[in-house]
Image (cartoon, coloured by chain):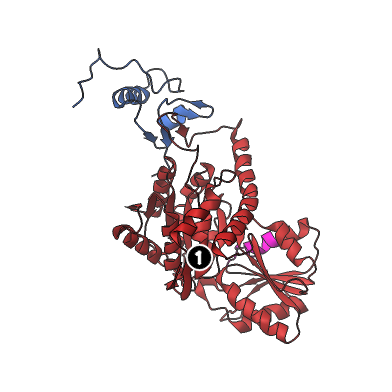
Chain colours: A red, B blue
Amino acid sequence: MSKAFLSGNEAFAEGVRLAKPHVISAYPITPQTIVVERLSEMVEDKSLKSEFIHVESEHSALSCAMGASAIGARAFTATSSQGLLYMAECLQYASGGRFPIVMMNANRSTALPWNIYGDQRDSISQLDCGWIQVYVEDAQESLDMAIQSFFIAEHEKVSTPVMVNLDGFVLTHTYEAVEIPSQEQADKFLPPFKTGNRMDFDNPKNMAFSAGPDSNMEFKLQQHKAMLDSKSVIELADKSFAEIFGRSYGGLIDTYKTDDAEYILITLGSITGLVREVVDELRAEGRKVGLVKLRYLRPFPDKELAEAVKNAKAVGTLEKDISFGYEGTVYTNVNSALIKNGIAIPSYNFIAGLGGRDISKKDIIHMFEHIEKGGEYVNFIGLGVNADE
Amino acid sequence: MSERITAKTITDNEFFYGHKACAGCGGSLAVRMALKVLGERALTVIPAGCMSAVGFNFPHLCFSNNAIISTFA
């Protein structure tokens, strides 16, 4: 184990190096570029023995990773924003084909208008594509989830691709002290990739086939069940990771001071760090507030979330996303989880940080005040103009 | 260099059969002959189109070698 000063992208690259993928195929896009640059340097200096394939597009990057996975190779790719949308066909292909690829996505706004800064509209717009989606908070969690994601994706009960989301710039380009585990630790945690879902000269397979109305639904049900089963594998990965590396992230969700909290803010990604600080400050004033960090959006931690907020008086969902014509998609999912679990409390939506707009401490304090006092259900935070103008 | 394959020496093994292509379909004959020449260790990758539509209808899978339909290019 060693310590280094790394950005989120660089920390993720270190995690991928420890996971030793056979094939890395990628196309550069801001703010993801550094992760693939570092990996190509590792391949060049032979500290990582992988086949690094420069492709001509994101569509090809994921198609190439699927080809690798179809012959039983561990495959990695990375993208962001327009690149993720450009590979949209391949996203559903990879999950339907049950290819356990790991992809890092640097969360970035989507055009139009063009914008390279961070929000979560790219990945959240692909929530239904059949990939496991995890959102990380800091550089250490980035590195750790690079390793854990291969464990989860490749587990025989799961066999589903995993997308690890890092907030663009705020996380991908921010430097922090990061512990780099040893190769021995990584090897102890992550077994070699073994699958029957592959081409084999002794037992040839026809893959990525058609399934008509008589069998299609059964394939889709199996895909859904594997995603639901991944919940137990996610918890197992967290526990097993903690035993070997000494760090636990709580599995599907992480909670902070929720036990006696009356007002809870639900977050995902890097903003969680600032919200945790605000919770401490408000607690010092005697206010009973808490925080739930959604680590996964798919599978959605419905029961875990309900359990964490069941004694609260009201909750709020903070997300860098809007589903035009309705509300934030995370909020829709949160409310569904509450209703299914018999929790009827006021629930508010805070849409913030679109196109990389800063979310301040003051903004978060206002969110907690809004949750406590009540008001509009769906709120845009930090607008430069009056919403009515 | 391997021996020249002729009509007399070409293998009787079939790698693409039982599919739903029309009788006499040129595409299916081309794939059938190509695979006889390439042999059982060939990996077949076919884009979405007639040959993938007629050859890969689960559970009716018609390649006896390893084969896959690719994504749209």
- Label 1: how many residues lie within 10 Å, few (<14), some (14-19) or many (20+)? many
Left/right placement of residue A250 relative to residue A311 reads left
Q: Position of residue B41 (x, y in %)?
A: 34, 29
Does any portion of residue B49 appear in the rendered image? no
Residue A201, quarter of picture: top left
Q: Position of residue B72 (x, y in %)?
A: 42, 43
User: Outermost residue toward the bottom?
Assistant: A285
Q: Position of residue A195 (x, y in %)?
A: 50, 40
User: Magenta segment range?
Assistant: A321-334
* Up/down of B19 relative to A227, above or below: above
Residue A333 shown in magenta: yes
Left/right placement of residue A98 relative to residue A66 reads right
- Residue denoted by label 1: A142
Left/right placement of residue A41 relative to residue A314 reads left
Residue A338 shown in magenta: no
Q: Choose between A146 and A125: the one closer to the eye.
A: A146
* Up/down of A83 relative to A293, above or below: above
In the rendered view of the protein, which quadrant contains the C terminus of chain A?
bottom right
Residue type at mark 1: give it. Answer: Ser
Residue B4, quarter of picture: top left
Q: Position of residue A309 (x, y in %)?
A: 75, 67
Q: Chain of mark 1?
A: A
Identify the residue shown where x is 61% and y is 45%: A226
Does any portion of residue A78 appear in the rendered image? yes
Identify the residue shown where x is 52% and y is 76%: A357
* Up/down of A32 relative to B37, above or below: below
Secondary-structure class at tag 1: helix
Q: Choose between A357 and A208: the one closer to the eye.
A: A208
Identify the residue shown where x is 56% and y is 57%: A133
Q: Choose between A119 and A263: the one closer to the eye.
A: A263
